[in-house]
Image (spheres, helix red, strand yellow):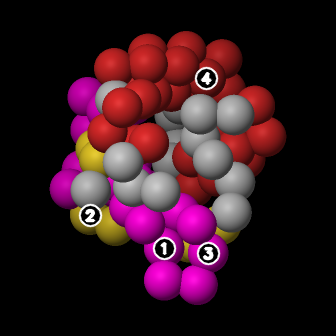
Amino acid sequence: MVELKIADDVTVVVESGEKKSYSYTVLSGGQEVISYETSADVRKPAGKVGLRNVIYRQVSGLDKQAIEIALDTAVGKHKTAIEQLE
């Protein structure tokens, strides 16, 4: 399990999926907002954009550009840990 901090109260938990490669769970204020499985890797452009859009749609008050910057930073810090989920 890898936790990506997106904002003060928004975190994404990245795990190995059961049916797909990855499982993403978006938490806001410690509560699960949405959880889904996908083959899209957050370290790659399509995976990052997909997760950014999910966060943007599901968590109010966050700007797409701010989410993308936060994802870039968090993924960069946890790249090795995400690789180990494969």
Q: Label 1 vs label 2: CA separation?
A: 20 Å
Q: Are marks 1 and 3 in contact (CB under 8 Å)?
A: yes
Residue 46, located in which quarter of the rendered image?
top right
Q: Which mark is residue 68?
A: 4
Q: Earlier in the sequence, mark 1 or mark 2?
A: 1
Question: Residue 16 appears at what percent x and percent y?
Answer: 43, 66
Amino acid type of the residue tagged 3 in the rendering: Lys
Amino acid type of the residue tagged 2 in the rendering: Gln
- In the picture as drawn, the residue positioned furthest to the right comes out as 46
Q: Which mark is residue 17?
A: 1
- Residue linked to disc 3: 20
Closest to the camera, between mark 1 and mark 2, is: 1
Instruction: Describe the element under mark 1 as helix, strand or loop.
Output: loop
Q: Residue at x 61, y 23 (%)?
A: 68
Q: Label 2 vs label 3: CA separation?
A: 23 Å
Quick check: can you spot residue 56? Answer: no
Closest to the camera, between mark 2 and mark 3, is: 3
Image quadrant occupied by the N terminus: bottom left
Q: Nearer the viewer, residue 7 or 70?
A: 70
Closest to the camera, between mark 4 and mark 2, is: 4
| Picture mark count | 4
Question: Residue 12 appears at what percent x and percent y?
Answer: 39, 48
Q: Label 3 vs label 4: CA separation?
A: 23 Å
- In the picture as drawn, the residue positioned furthest to the left comes out as 30
- Residue linked to disc 2: 31
Magenta part of the protein: which range?
4-30
Amino acid type of the residue tagged 1 in the rendering: Gly
Residue 25, located in which quarter of the rendered image?
bottom left
Q: Residue at x 44, y 42 (%)?
A: 83
Q: Nearer the viewer, residue 31 or 79?
A: 79
